[in-house]
Amino acid sequence: MPEATTACLRRVGSNAPIDEILGIMREDGGVIVEGFLTSDQVARFNAEVEPALSGIRPGATVDDKAVKEFFGSNTKRLTNLITHSEVFRKEIIDHDLLHGLADAIFLEECGSYWMVTGQVIEVGPGNRAQPLHRDLENWYPFIGMGPSGPETGVNFFFALTEFTEENGATRVIPGSNHWPDYEDRGTPAQTIPAIMNAGDALLFSGKTAHGGGANVTTDFYRRALSIGLSPSILTGEEAYPFLVSMETARTLSPRVQSLIGFRSQYPIGNPGLWMSDYRELADHLKL
């Protein structure tokens, strides 16, 4: 079994050049970007999602044992954040650094990309470590392609509270994006905790083995914001055009409308997908 290539996750500031940030992510599989969000943005976002999050019961709602283990017995997940939070739809998902990084990752290879999910993940006391996995497993054929396959997605994983090893910081196996066999998800002993302050973000590849850590505290609720982006030729986890009202969609910037499927997609080598009578969807929707 391959070993992790580094003993820690490298860190850069939010003012670091995009090439530097992505160079580390591609080499190590993940990189921590410090101060990605301001403390004010974190506080306002947390306040906006608190009412909806407090009404959610922890754990999965299905009977499948593996799914229950993956979602966690004391973990809450809040989705459809475009609807729940103005800070999310106007500031976080429209953040210049997020789009600058995503453009550099996807545009040359894929041509267009969108958000497959945006969710708050709150890991409560006593929650066990999540099974290690790669996000590209959502699209099964890419597992067999290994490291030579295309980038199926990246995750911007924002700390909304302090992340410590004790409270369940996400654990990553640096270098696992280069392993030849993606059926090999590694072992907990190979993982490195992503220690972060609120507002920091862990940017990692869909090829990187990772999982939520165990929360061994008695009273701390570790909260994160996960934003997954993928080429728009791949089906997302959240069907935003059926979840977000047209009234809300009209208030969004064009690039956010595109991220959530209210505009047509233009992958390389294709005249357009997600269209209406072969015309731009935004024209049909009068956006």
Image: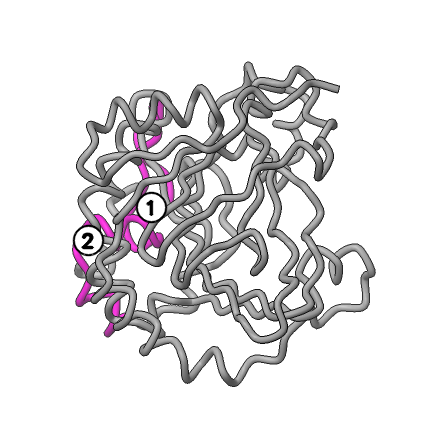
Highlighted magenta segment, given as a residue range:
246-275
Q: Locate residue 218: give its quadrant.
A: bottom right
Q: Seen in the image, is 202 located left or right of residue 262? A: right
Q: In which quarter of the image is residue 247?
A: bottom left
Mark sitting on residue 283: 2
| Quadrant occupied by the N terminus | top right
Q: Which of 11 and 105 is in front in this view?
A: 11
Name the quadrant of the C terminus: bottom left
Question: Magenta segment: does it hold 270?
Answer: yes
Q: Which amino acid does label 2 sit on?
A: Asp
Look at 71% across and 31% down and name the residue there.
186
State the image coordinates of residue 132 (x, y, percent, origin top left). Answer: 68, 42
| Residue 264, placed above or below residue 164 | above
Residue name at image x 66 percent, y 63 percent: 216
Which image quarter: residue 102? top left
Q: Is residue 200 left or right of residue 178?
A: left
